[in-house]
Image (cartoon, rainbow, N blue to C red):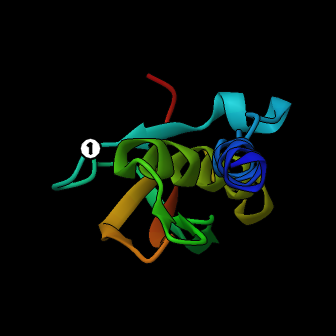
Amino acid sequence: MRLLLLSALTLSATACTWVPIEPQGKAVRVLPAGPVASGCINKGEVVVTVKSKVGLYNRNPLRVQEELETLARNEAHSASANAVQAVGQPAEGSQRFLAFQCPPR
């Protein structure tokens, strides 16, 4: 019984990851699906990955998507972008984003 409880506790602790937003990521916005505003310049693509499954446990899909967006925002800086837009849905903890340099709002 102790082993089962210890295993469950370990699994729940490792399943709860948290991706912090970095200072440069705070300035990056996530664009909704659809046409991109005029004046935005495509700067490339960002591909990010997080754990979507820990052992037999599938993580909450909303939490996974939130972490993917945070990682994409953090990575956009390396593409000289200030906005990202998802290309499709997350798949197995991975997602593609287009990176854009858009005029200030």
Q: Residue at x 79, y 62 (%)?
A: 78
Q: Is residue 2 left or right of residue 96?
A: right
Location of residue 94 with respect to 68 vertically, above or below: below
Q: Which residue is drawn at 65% across and 49% down?
A: 8
The picture quadrant where one finds residue 90 is: bottom left
Question: Would residue 101 be visible to someone looking at this image?
Answer: no
Mark 1 is on which residue type?
A: Pro
Q: Which residue is drawn at 41% across and 47% down?
A: 60
Q: In this view, does 44 lie to the left or right of 77?
A: left
For label 1, the SS is loop
In the displayed image of the protein, which residue is found farthest to the front? 1
Location of residue 54 with respect to 21 vertically, above or below: below
Question: Would residue 100 be visible to someone looking at this image?
Answer: yes
Residue 62: percent from left, percent from top? 37, 43
Q: Kindly identify which residue carries mark 1.
A: 32
Residue 71: percent from left, percent from top? 66, 52
Q: In which quarter of the image is the C terminus?
A: top left
Residue 59: percent from left, percent from top? 47, 54
Q: Nearer the viewer, residue 57 or 48?
A: 57
The residue carrying pointer 1 sits among few (fewer than 14), some (14 to 19) or many (20 or more) residues within 10 Å by Cα, namely few
Location of residue 104 with respect to 47 vertically, above or below: above
Q: In this view, does 9 lie to the left or right of 99?
A: right
Q: Nearer the viewer, residue 14 or 40?
A: 14
Residue 74: percent from left, percent from top? 72, 48
Q: Which of 36 and 63 is in front in this view?
A: 63
Location of residue 60 with respect to 56 vertically, above or below: above
In the displayed image of the protein, which residue is found farthest to the top? 105
